[in-house]
Image (tube, helix red, strand yellow):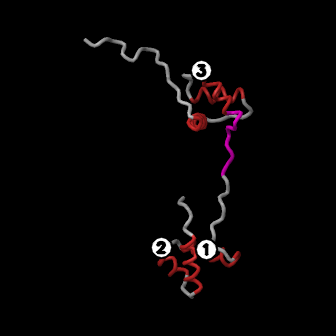
Amino acid sequence: MSGTHSLDLRERVIAAWREGEGKSAIARRFMLGYATVRRYIARFEASGSVHARPHGGGAPRKVDAAGEVLLRHLVRERPDATDEELARQYSQRADGSISHATVNRVLHRMGLTRKKSHCTPWRATAKP
């Protein structure tokens, strides 16, 4: 989904409509969808304005500040745990469950990076 159209474009659509131009012609002229033109006109007729509606806000975060503290503690306990393991541990200690993708997003947002330990040294054999 793209962003909102400019207020200038919306006002030009309404100006063309008030001058008697048809909705289909306006849609072609400004390279907009017919439904978009119809919505702009309906909004103008209902409210007298073509301003975009404010953003709805989105869904609240699943991990709040207390959850971030818990995740930071879990990472400190086991720095080489996978996201799946951290999600499982979080679910056991917190009220709700989260996915491994959520763990990854929260850790990224907090700026936490983890260094994985390897079972074998990186170069197990010496160069000949």
x and y percent of residue 56 in the render?
67, 57
Query: Which label was assigned to residue 40?
Result: 1
Toward the left, the furthest residue is: 128
User: Which circle's residue, 3 or 2, is located before the other in the chain?
Assistant: 2
For residue 13, side relative to residue 29 (left or right): right
How far apart are the two marked residues, 2 and 1, measured between alpha carbons?
14 Å
- Give the residue type at disc 3: Arg
Q: Are marks 2 and 1 in contact (CB under 8 Å)?
A: no
Toward the bottom, the furthest residue is: 20
Query: Which label was assigned to residue 78?
Result: 3
Q: Circle 3 — which element? A: loop
User: Which circle's residue, 2 or 1, is located before the other in the chain?
Assistant: 2
Which residue carries the number 2 mark? 31
- Give the residue type at disc 2: Met
Instruction: Identify which residue is drawn at 64% across, 29% down.
Output: 71
> Few, some or many C-alpha atoms within 10 Å of disc 1 (few <14, some 14-19, many ≥20)?
some
Instruction: Identify which residue is drawn at 55% across, 61% down.
Output: 3
Q: Is residue 118 above or below residue 107?
A: above
**Predominant SS of the magenta segment:** loop
How far apart are the two marked residues, 1 and 3, measured between alpha carbons?
55 Å
What range is drawn magenta here? 58-67
Q: Circle 1 — which element? A: helix
> Few, some or many C-alpha atoms within 10 Å of disc 3 (few <14, some 14-19, many ≥20)?
few
